[in-house]
Amino acid sequence: MSKKKETSDERRAALTGSIFAAAQGADSKVPKRRESPSIVGAALGTHSEGLSSELERLRSERDLALASGQILVEIEPDRIRDALPRDRLAAAFSDASFEDLKHSIQSDGQFIPVAVRKTADGAFEIAAGRRRLEACRQLGIPVLARVQELDDVEMLQLQFEENEQRSDITSFERAKWYEAVQEQFTLSTPELARRFKISQPMIVKYLKLARLPDAVVDKLDDPRELSLGDSEKLHKKMHDQSVKDLAKIAARAKGKGTKAQIKAMLEVQKLPSRDTSEFKESVEKGDRKIATISSKRNTLRIAVAEDLDPDAKSKLISEISVLLRKHL
């Protein structure tokens, strides 16, 4: 038997003996001596002090376990905020796999808790498990959570580690997350690579994927299907094709699937330059030819008469400058 157990048994024995002795004295017609009425109170007080001490110890152990994440609690979803960069696109909260997750939680319960930290105002912030949190929110039930003491760096690391273990996180979602982390925490590309132990060239590829123009991405059936390879090819395609034209091509192929849209954008032939017109025009004043204006591709040339007055040339240049600023 442990020392704590012996102490507890001794206290209970002492309390029982004190109460029994006091009761005997009260029932005796001829008490042997005049006992103080505080006997029972003193015994109870002693026991109460022991209980208070034990309760305080249990509370301390509970708080320590809660802080270290050893205790799971149920929390109303509305008490949990999301302060970290989003690691999922909106489609991840409405697709077939999300509906399967909701059905599983509703039928069998939530087996994997979300990870949260407590805030100063008594609310919580989520580190990992956003889809489980949203599923519980939509089902109108509390979410099972592991409450841990985490600083900003630890929160971010926990979010990253969980995503690394999940196969359903896509390259595009990872890319957008890296981009959001870089912006929110003001990290350089080398710092970002070091923090998550990823090579700098790979981080550059992810950031390049994340920075595909919204005009194109928004036209895709499901941007989550974009890969790092697609990103490289589309960025090269944008060297000879405008973003506006690529977005139109993606829009025309909408409904055929993201891969079909990407293929259509990559296979389109280079459009001819819009500025291929050539012209030449003489400018006359009376019977006199004073200038010739010609254009070829993006070059506009004005040749004035050789005997044009210098002041007139200066005025002409000034007025042409005004016209260029007005119309270009």
Image (tube, grey):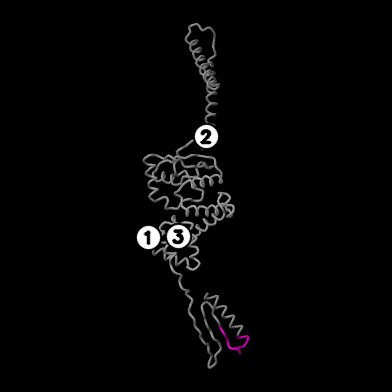
Q: Is residue 310 magenta?
A: yes
- What is the number of the mark on residue 256? 1
> Would you name the residue on which mark 2 appears?
65
- Camera-nearest label, 1 or 2: 1
Instruction: Please tell me whether mark 3 sits on a helix, a strand or a loop.
Output: helix
Residue drawn at 50 percent across, 58 percent down: 209
Marks 1,3: beta carbons within 8 A: no
Pointer 2 or 3: first along the chain: 2
Marks 2,3: beta carbons within 8 A: no
Mark 2: few/some/many CA within 10 Å (<14, 14-19, 20+):
some
> Would you name the residue on which mark 3 appears?
217
- What is the number of the mark on residue 153? none
Instruction: Please tell me whether mark 1 sits on a helix, a strand or a loop.
Output: loop
- Mark 1 belongs to which amino acid? Lys
Q: Quadrant of residue 154?
A: top right
x and y percentages locating residue 255 in the rendered image = 37, 60
Magenta stretch?
A: 302-312
